[in-house]
Amino acid sequence: MTMHVSTHSLGATAPHAGPTANASFGTVVWRWLVLSIRHIAKRRKIARDAVWLRQSSSAILHDIGITRDEIDQALRYGRPQSRS
């Protein structure tokens, strides 16, 4: 077995460190930026959909199969419990 000597941190070269272990600083920043933008876009979509659901008529909510209480519960605590 050959010995590999490196000046890099052992944590960064460990097999479990993943594909970004040896990424350049610019690559790390770019990936962080892309993930941040995706996160913001997802939050904006949830907020937009919540406004639409809150403003929807009772007939539309009945067709979808949800109540206004379930909308508020889902927005506050996440996905509502499934009905049995």
Image (cartoon, grey):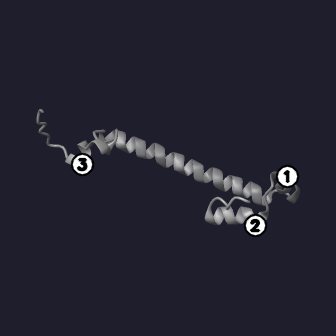
Q: Is residue 75 above or below residue 46?
A: below
| Mark found first going from the N terminus, 3 or 2 | 3
Residue drawn at the location 53% of the way across and 46% of the way down = 38
Asked whether disc 3 touches disc 1, contact meaning CB atoms under 8 Å apart, the reply is no
Q: Is residue 83 above or below residue 7?
A: below
Residue carrying label 2: 69
Query: Disc 2 versus disc 1: distance between alpha carbons?
Result: 15 Å
Residue carrying label 1: 63
Residue drawn at the location 20% of the way across and 47% of the way down = 9
Q: Residues within 10 Å of mark 3 (few under 14, many from 20)?
A: few
Identify residue type, mark 2. Answer: Asp
Numbered disc 1: secondary structure: helix
Asked whether disc 3 touches disc 2, contact meaning CB atoms under 8 Å apart, the reply is no
Identify residue type, mark 1. Answer: Asp
Residue drawn at the location 13% of the way across and 36% of the way down = 4
Residue carrying label 3: 11
Q: Residues within 10 Å of mark 2 (few under 14, many from 20)?
A: few
Numbered disc 2: secondary structure: helix
Residue farthest along the right direction in this orientation:
59
Identify residue type, mark 3. Answer: Gly
Of the pair 55 and 58, the residue shown nearer to us: 58
Q: Which mark is residue 4?
A: none
Q: Residues within 10 Å of mark 1 (few under 14, many from 20)?
A: few
Q: Tell me where residue 67 appears, x and y as whole percent.
A: 79, 62
Query: Disc 3 versus disc 2: distance between alpha carbons?
Result: 48 Å
- For the N terminus, the quadrant is top left
